[in-house]
């Protein structure tokens, strides 16, 4: 009798893999203090460090059940190619989400113009690398950049990923500069559509969620990172009410466990609504796999096998397997990927 269950592989739709080096360096203060530490780590990265470190972390992703990753990358073109090499070594599918950065951050992260950014992106595409357009945020990209990048992504039928409404300060700064909230700005600049994934949206209000629903856009939730950085709670219940598509990301890779990310989504929704089973287990597994693939523009990625003899699943009835998997299991139930 087969003691394994075959499932679609999980898709990590949002990873900053170099941030794995910050694991365990908790510290105090807030997101913005952590960001300074993160920028120091980013500055020391080289193609060789990226290839070695990413190969290890992608191996960890693969072992946990992720079989595809969206690498949100802002370390430079040669480092981008090193990340793709590392993914090949680890046997994980990769979509390189090249970040557009006009202001802020480090000099190595920035491009002088949208034209320079598109030259970089096209050079990666020319090498056969799957890519997505990734304006880093409304903090990093002015309005005219967002407009140009939105047009390009739509014309080229490429995924567009962007951080938005992650922090209350970000919302306040956007209101001061543009007179609207971050996701409203994305809508006004043509960056919202079925190809768009908004990362985090922890501070999105009802009007912004309505815009996401109308655009058939996706939200990428990264609950373990959002908890680690004090980003706030995803408005999960309001997202569910609007039937907005959700996917997951390991983000800073402070934890690598897709089942934990999915369990956190349900836990947040339960705390917000006072009821259980807000997201059915089958739907959560869809967030972890199919919606992530859609977010990255993937048609296929490897499957995984789950150990039915694991102590967390032993003796569970067939009809309860998905509930048991999401509610009580960790990544160690994954035995292999095809």
Image (tube, grey):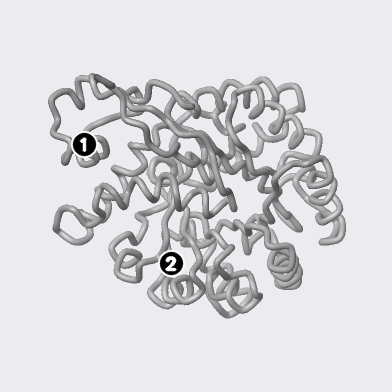
Q: Earlier in the sequence, mark 1 or mark 2?
A: 2
> Residue 147: image x %, image y %?
72, 72
Could you say whether the residue bearing mark 2 is in a helix, strand or loop? loop
Residue 71 at x, y = what percent? 62, 41
Q: Which residue is mark 1?
A: 321
**Rendered image quadrant of residue 225:** top left
Snapshot quadrant of residue 20: top right
Residue 191 at what x, y percent from top left?
63, 69
**Towards the viewer: 315 or 326:** 315
Q: Residue at x 14, y 57 (%)?
A: 275
The residue closer to the viewer here, 26 or 184, is 184
Q: Is residue 111 left or right of residue 318?
A: right
- Tell me the number on the disc at residue 287: none
**Relative horizontal placement of residue 280, taking residue 202 as reference (left or right):** left
Q: Which quadrant is home to the N terminus?
A: top left
Identify which residue is drawn at 58% across, 51% down.
296
Residue 31: image x %, image y %?
A: 49, 46
Q: Which dot marks residue 204?
A: 2
- Marks 1 and 2, how far apart in space? 34 Å
- SS for callout 1: helix
Left/right placement of residue 146 relative to residue 16 reads: right
Seen in the picture, residue 29 relative to 273 is either above or below; the reply is above
- Number of other residues with Cα within 10 Å of mark 2, as a class: few under 14, some 14 to 19, many 20 or more: many
What residue appears at the point 39 percent right and 50 percent down from the top-left corner? 287
**Residue at the front extreme?**
1
Q: Residue at x 65, y 22 (%)?
A: 89
Give above or below for 305 relative to 144: above
Q: Residues within 10 Å of mark 1 (few under 14, many from 20)?
A: some
Proximity of marks 1 and 2: CB atoms separated by less than 8 Å? no
Q: Nearer the viewer, mark 1 or mark 2?
A: 1
């Amino acid at each position: 009798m087969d003691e394994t269950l075959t499932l679609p592989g999980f898709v990590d739709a949002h990873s900053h893999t170099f941030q794995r080096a910050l694991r365990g360096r908790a510290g105090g203060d807030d997101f913005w203090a952590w960001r300074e530490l993160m920028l120091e780590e980013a500055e020391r990265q080289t193609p060789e460090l990226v290839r070695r470190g990413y190969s290890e972390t992608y191996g960890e992703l693969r072992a946990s059940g992720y079989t595809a990753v969206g690498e949100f990358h802002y370390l430079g073109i040669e480092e981008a190619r090193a990340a793709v090499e590392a993914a090949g070594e680890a046997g994980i599918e990769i979509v390189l989400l090249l970040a557009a950065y006009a202001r802020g951050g480090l000099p190595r992260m920035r491009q002088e113009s949208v034209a320079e950014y598109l030259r970089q992106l096209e050079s990666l595409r020319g090498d056969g690398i799957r890519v997505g357009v990734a304006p880093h945020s409304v903090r990093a990209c002015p309005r005219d950049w967002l407009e140009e990048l939105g047009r390009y992504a739509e014309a080229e039928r490429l995924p567009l990923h962007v951080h938005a409404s992650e922090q209350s300060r970000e919302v306040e700064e956007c209101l001061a500069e543009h007179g609207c909230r971050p996701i409203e700005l994305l809508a006004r600049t043509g960056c919202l559509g079925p190809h768009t994934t908004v990362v985090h949206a922890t501070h999105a209000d009802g009007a912004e969620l309505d815009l996401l629903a109308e655009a058939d856009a996706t939200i990428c939730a990264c609950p373990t990172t959002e908890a680690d950085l004090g980003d706030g709670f995803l408005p999960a219940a309001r997202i569910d009410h609007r039937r907005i598509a959700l996917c997951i990301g390991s983000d800073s890779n402070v934890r690598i466990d897709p089942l934990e990310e999915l369990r956190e989504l349900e836990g947040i929704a339960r705390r917000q609504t006072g009821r259980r089973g807000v997201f059915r287990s089958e739907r959560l597994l869809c967030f972890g796999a199919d919606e992530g693939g859609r977010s990255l523009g993937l048609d296929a990625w490897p499957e995984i096998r789950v150990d039915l003899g694991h102590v967390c699943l032993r003796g569970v009835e067939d009809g309860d397997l998905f509930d048991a998997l999401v509610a009580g299991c960790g990544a160690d139930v994954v035995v292999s990927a095809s």
